Amino acid sequence: MLVRLRFPLLVLGVVALVAYWPWVRNQWDRLTKPKSGLDAAVSLDTEYWCPMCPGVLSEWPAKCPVCHMALVRRKKGEPVALPDGVVARMQFTPYRVQLAGIRTAPAEFRPLAWEATCGGRLEGDPLSVRIHVPLAGLAAVRPGLMVDVESETHPGQTFKARVRLAGDEVNPETQTFVARLAVEDPQRELRPGLFVTVRLRVPVAQVDANARLARDEWRDRTAADLALRSLLAFAGPTPGLESLLEAACQSTLRGSGLTLSVPAGAVIDTGERKVVFVERGPGMFDGLEVTLGRRCGDYYPVLRGLAPGDRVVTAGAFLLDAETRLNPALAAAYFGAAARPTPAAPVGAPSSDDERLIARQKLCPVTDEPLGSMGAPVKLVVEGRTVFICCKGCERELRAGAKKYLAKVPK
C-alpha cells in the first residue's frame, strides 16, 4: 500500500510545502537568524523602512545603506505622514513606467535670463533714452545695468548703454515703469531724435530677490542638517560642512550667471501651487511643492524645493498628477504615504468659531478619520447640534444613525 501511495503522498507534500511556504520560511528565519529583543519579533505583517529614504525596505532590523539611519519598524500598509513639502507619493511598476512614457531629467544649472525689448527716442547732447519697462523687470532693472541699444540707421551695430535711473512708480494702466539710460557713443554716430531699440537682459541668478531666496533656502537646509546630525550623532563629515560647501558652489555658479532650473514640461501648475514629481527610487515618484521664478523660454528657475541633481519627471508628469487626483487612495497606500487633501467637498474658508469646533472635535464621527484628511471638513446641523464630517459621503450615514454618531462628538 505504501509503495502504491508514495507518488500521491509526494505530490501532496509538495503542494502543502508550496501552500505554506511563507510560514515555513518565517519559522526557519526565526530559528536561524539571531534575535535582539522586540525588534527581532518579525512577523509576516511587519517591515522595516527608512523615513529619510522611503524606497529602502527590509524584513529585518538593519541600517539604511544610503543615510545610515536605523530602520523603523512598522506594520505593512500602516499610514505614515508624508515629509514636509511632499504632496503625493506614487509607485509604478517598470511596465507601467514604460507604457506611460515617463522620462526624467536632472535639475541643472543653466544660464537663464529675464529679457525684454523696449523702444524710445534719443534725447539731449549727452545722449540718453527714456523707456517704459514691463512690470516683470521691476526687481531686475537697477542703476548700473548695462544694456544693448540698436538703431535702424546703423544696421548690425550695437551700442552700449547704462541704466542711470529706474523708477519705482508703476503705471496702473500700462503696468510699466520708467527707466532712463545713458547711451555710450564715443564716435558720435547717433543723433538726438532717433528712435532706438533697447534690449534688456538680466541673468536670473543676479536678481536680488532670487539670491535672497536662495540664501534663505540654504540657511533652512543647513539648520535642519545640523539638528538632524546632532540628534542622531551621525558619524560622518563635520556637521554643516556639506551644506557650506554646497552653498559655496552654488554661490560661484550664480556669480557666473547660472541658475538651478527645471524644464517647463515638468511643472504642474494647479493655480494654488506649483508641483514637480521627483524620482526617489525605481518607479517611485514624490510630488514636491516648489517655488519657481518667472518662466525663461523652456525652463523655470527654481527658487525653493529642489536640489541640484534631483531627477524630475519631464514626460508623464500630468499622468502622475491625474493618477493622484483620480485615485488618491493609491497615492496613500504605498510606503504608508498620507494622501494630500483633495477638493472633494469644498466649503470655503471656515470662520474662527468653526475652526475652534473643528480643533475640539478632531475626528469624523462616521469614519474616525482626522478632519481635513479628505479635504475641507463638511459642516452639518443634526438634531440641533453642529457637527463636522470628513466628506460629503458621510452625511447620509450620519443622519441615519444620528444618536450613535452624535454621542462621539464632544459637547
Image: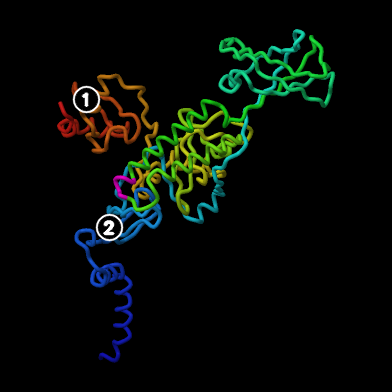
Q: How is the image coloured?
A: rainbow
The residue drawn where x is 19% and y is 23% is 385
Q: Position of residue 134 (x, y in %)?
A: 62, 18
> Do the CB atoms of the residues marked 2 and 1 lie less than 8 Å apart?
no
Where residue 41 sits, quadrant-wise, is bottom left
Say what amino acid the circle numbered 2 marks.
Answer: Asp
The residue drawn where x is 57% and y is 29% is 206
**Per the image, is 35 magenta?**
no
The residue drawn where x is 54% and y is 40% is 266
Dot 1 crowding, Cα within 10 Å, few <14, some 14–19, many 20+? some
Which residue is at the front of the view, 305 or 98?
305
Quarter placement of the C terminus: top left
Residue under label 1: 382
Q: Is residue 32 left or right of residue 159?
A: left
The stretch in magenta equals 229-233
Q: Nearer the viewer, mark 2 or mark 1?
A: 2
Q: Position of residue 220 (x, y in %)?
A: 40, 35
Say what amino acid the circle numbered 1 marks.
Answer: Val
Residue under label 2: 45
Q: Identify whether 234 is placed above or below 410.
A: below
**Extreme-top residue of the structure:** 124
Q: Identify whether 190 is placed above or below 377.
A: above
The residue drawn where x is 56% and y is 35% is 254
Tally the numbered discs: 2
Q: CA distance from mark 2 to mark 1?
A: 40 Å
Secondary structure, magenta segment, majority class: helix
Asked which secondary structure carries label 2, the reply is loop
